[in-house]
Amino acid sequence: MTATAPRRPHRACVGLLFGLGWLASAGPSAAGAWNRRAGEGLAIIDYTLGSGTDYFDGGGHLAPARHYAKSELAAYLEYGATDALTLVARPSLDDVHVGAPGAGVYRGFGSSAVGAQWQALVFGPAVLALQGTFAIPGSTSRSDPAVVGNTAREGDLRVLAGVGLPVLFRPFIDLQGSYRIRSGGAAAQWHGDATFGFYPTDKLLILLQSFSTVPTGPGDARLPSFRATRLELKGVYALTEAWAVQLGAFTTARGRDALRERGFTTGVWWFF
């Protein structure tokens, strides 16, 4: 760590949320396996813009779809209640447009989540944590096509493991797996997330990330299930010890019954 780098940026580097279905994929799990120290915190304000005009059908092949576009302004918060317990939260505002046929528009609160993470084990450069979160949707309307698939309440239990290596570029790996229960007839989901990060300079953090969702059942017509893997490349640049900026891009690499969404994200980090 240097005076020009954000304090322990790897402790909050995994997966902010992006686009359709991905609030369910990440949420407060963005914390990664490393907890905050007692009295320390992180606040991130990020803006995400994503869109898609095709989707992966039930066989995993691309097919045309009605146009979908979503912009999101979100706040992500971490706070170390104790050295072993970190509190996390993520409220958001969404602007979603779905094209014809069956066009729809939604503007309002997005899915918002709160939770806590317990540092179960620290063994040298390796850590293990357990996290529980609960999310509520911004809308429960089943008549608006702009919020289809995003109207369920969700409870998530997650295992997180990470390891950092004291070698050139300070690489680290963060792996997460979770089981998510969803309300209203929506299928439960398994989630698997992976991040590889490294520092090409003292001020710049590069993140390569993958987020995968696998449903346990078919869901229903208004809360359909989907299978998808999303890839993301992100850079976080330290302006000072406490402030950093981020810029990233993402795409849905593969899926079944899932929109192929592409877009970018930008944001500001504040370590306090």
Image (tube, helix red, strand yellow):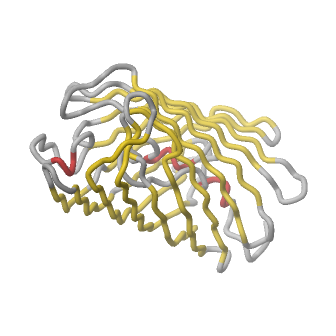
Taking the view exactly as shown, the residue that stands out farthest to the right is 167
The structure residue drawn at horizontal position 53% and vertical position 42%, both measured from the top left corner, is 211
Residue 272 visible? The answer is no
**Where on the picture, by quarter, is residue 150?**
top left
The percent position of residue 266, horizontal first and vertical second, equals: 49, 70
Residue 30 visible? The answer is yes
Q: Is residue 121 above or below residue 251?
A: above
Closest to the observer, 68 or 53:
53
Closest to the observer, 84 or 25:
25
Quadrant for the C terminus in the image: bottom right
Closest to the observer, 218 or 191:
218
Q: Is residue 25 above or below residue 171?
A: above
Instruction: Report the side of 135 relative to 14 (left or right).
Output: left
Taking the view exactly as shown, the residue that stands out farthest to the left is 143
The percent position of residue 250, horizontal first and vertical second, equals: 52, 56
Quadrant for the N terminus in the image: bottom right
The structure residue drawn at horizontal position 76% and vertical position 57%, both measured from the top left corner, is 198
**Where on the picture, by quarter, is residue 154?**
top left
The percent position of residue 43, horizontal first and vertical second, equals: 49, 64
Instruction: Report the side of 58 relative to 118 (left or right).
Output: left
The structure residue drawn at horizontal position 70% and vertical position 40%, both measured from the top left corner, is 162
The structure residue drawn at horizontal position 61% and vertical position 58%, both measured from the top left corner, is 233
Q: Is residue 152 above or below residue 106?
A: above
The percent position of residue 252, horizontal first and vertical second, equals: 49, 47
